[in-house]
Image (cartoon, rainbow, N blue to C red):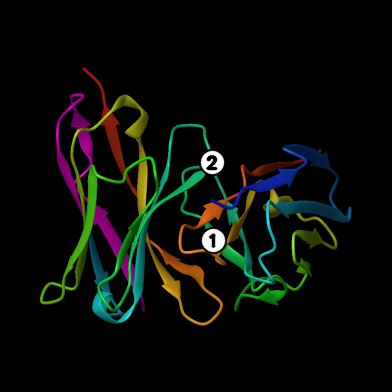
Amino acid sequence: EVQLVESGGGLIQPGGSLRLSCAASGLTVSGNYMSWVRQAPGKGLEWVSVIYSGDSTYYADSVRGRFTISRDNSKNTLYLQMNSLRAEDTAVYYCAREAGGRYRYDYWGQGTLVTVSS
Amino acid sequence: DIQMTQSPSSLSASVGDRVTITCRASQTISTYLNWYQQKPGKAPNLLIYDASNLQSGVPSRFSGSGSGTDFTLTISSLQPEDSATYYCQQSYRTLRTFGQGTKLEIK
């Protein structure tokens, strides 16, 4: 059974940094396209970033230069390092596996809430 | 970036009704279009991928169609548990994008 478990969310002041983790079981993060998707309170889904199995990374314009996606293959864990946080980064952050072929998010974590506020 | 526009933004329908939600892409995306259902406080759940393929375990009352720029999600006979928000998402470009969502309520 595939499980994705996020952690690391919390309350952080504007300008601060936070690192989110997504521990995977039932799949290998190194062998899959793994993404972060966020959802601001009461709003829709917003794609944030992806890391390909070949190590290429991509980011939404809203976070490029501030966020970094990475993975630790030995821990089978995906990360999102978030720097220079802003109030508009407040959201539930989900990690998700993107199945190959006709790409789609077939496995999601439960989400972790990040609140950026002074 | 490819913009995805859903309509309507919200709708209310009765149990047993046939419901259709549309999604339009700002440029052609072939059939690289997925549909998700999200209930309050939960992660999204994949319903349809590649525009018309039903994800395993999803009830057959859900179906999808379309290609190019125009797509539809249809629920053939609405059930109480279908009350949720529905999102389309394109996977044609590396920078993925979602529609703004359609909130479906049961009368």
Residue type at numbered disc 1: Asn
User: Residue B22 shows which numbered tag?
Assistant: none
**Location of residue B9 by image quarter:** top right
Residue at image point 15% right, 76% down = A73
- A85 with respect to A63 (left or right): left
Q: Can residue A12 be found in the magenta stretch?
A: yes
Residue at the spot of label 1? B45
Residue at image point 48% right, 70% down = A106
Residue at image point 69% right, 45% down = B5
Residue at image point 68% right, 77% down = B53
Q: Nearer the viewer, residue A17 or A115?
A: A17
Q: Nearer the viewer, residue B76 or A85?
A: A85
Residue at the spot of label 2? A44
Q: Which residues are magenta?
A: A1-20
Residue A55 percent location from the top left of the image: 25, 73
**Quarter of the image with the C terminus of chain B in it:** top right
Label 2 crowd bin: few (<14), some (14–19), many (20+), radius 10 Å:
some
Query: The disc numbered 2 marks a residue on which chain?
Result: A
- A59 with respect to A45 (left or right): left
Residue type at numbered disc 2: Gly
Residue A102 in the image: above or below residue A95: below
